[in-house]
Amino acid sequence: MRSCARGIASQLACGVKQIYIFALTILMLAVSGAACATHAKKRVKKVDVDGIDISHHNGKIDWKKVQKGHPEIRFVYIKATEGASWVDSNYEYNLKHARKKGFKVGSYHFFNYRVGAREQFDNFVKNVDRSKQDIIPMVDFEKYGSEKNASKVVAELKEFCRLVKRHFGVYPMIYTNERIYNLHLYKDFKRYHLFIANYKQRSPELKGDARYTIWQFSERGRIEGVKECVDLDRFHPDFSLNSITYSKKKHKK
């Protein structure tokens, strides 16, 4: 009888524990969603936001809702490609419909440190039409493997940028975070337009005399018409949309 009693007590305790874990999981999900929504209420204001950047995580966007709910948004960077062969299946849709609603749109490539510059460039230009770009192209550089590998990867990034310049007639914007720029990019890319991620409630502090063009100050914005949280971007006071406008006539081959 004693062993049976211990078994029942053990089962009851296990059941209570499972209920507790389930309730805690639901609570965490609710808090996470609320945090994103609360953040958006603080951030998405006319004086705060100049643009957004999106990727495959955001899916197909309802650009009519974005236009109606957020007239302060002036530009959009859309992820087109990654590595040597990956293409965002929603890229063409988002590009077409964002431009239809009057947003100034640019395309970006996510740089894969395991793949050579030429292969990545070929993927990018195969899928990005120069005639449909309103702002200069961009390359997203976030990973380089190990510190030992960094200089080799940065050299490939430089080659990618050279190829982009030859094709588009302009060097791409460099997207990265404050830490990576100050560690590995400050020597070779300080004259580029820089798109810097920094979520520390202060503007980016860059090594040397470089200045960021765009500051990605949040990754948790909520925009009507966009699934999931979205990145929120702001121009440096000395830059504007005119600074990154892509002139199709000027750069036409």
Image (spheres, rainbow, N blue to C red):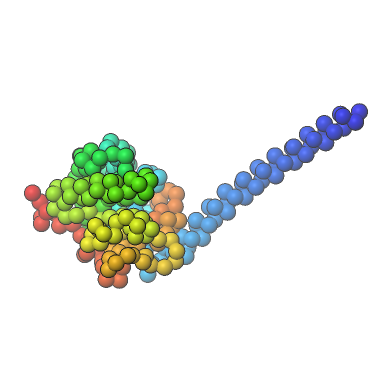
Closer to the camera in the image, 47 or 2: 2
x and y percent of residue 175 in the render?
31, 55
* Location of the N terminus (image quadrant): top right
Q: Nearer the viewer, residue 240 or 190?
A: 190
Q: Is residue 72 left or right of residue 27?
A: left
Regarding residue 205, the answer to whether it shows in the image is: yes
Left or right side of 65 for 162: left
Residue 99 in the image: state x and y as whole percent. Answer: 25, 52
Q: Residue furthest front?
A: 148
Instruction: Give percent across and percent down for residue 200.
Output: 45, 64
How many numbered marks appear?
0
Pick the front one: 124 or 101:
124
Q: Is residue 139 or residue 148 the one in the foreground?
A: 148
x and y percentages locating residue 71 in the rendered image: 34, 62
Q: Residue furthest right?
A: 1
Furthest-left residue in this view: 253
Q: Residue at coordinates 17% horizontally, 50% vertically from top-left?
A: 162
Which image quarter: residue 224?
A: bottom left
Residue at the (34%, 60%) spot, across then down: 182
Residue shown at 57% from the left, 48% from the top = 29
Q: Is residue 131 visible?
A: no
Which picture quadrant has residue 126? Answer: top left
Q: Is residue 13 left or right of residue 204?
A: right
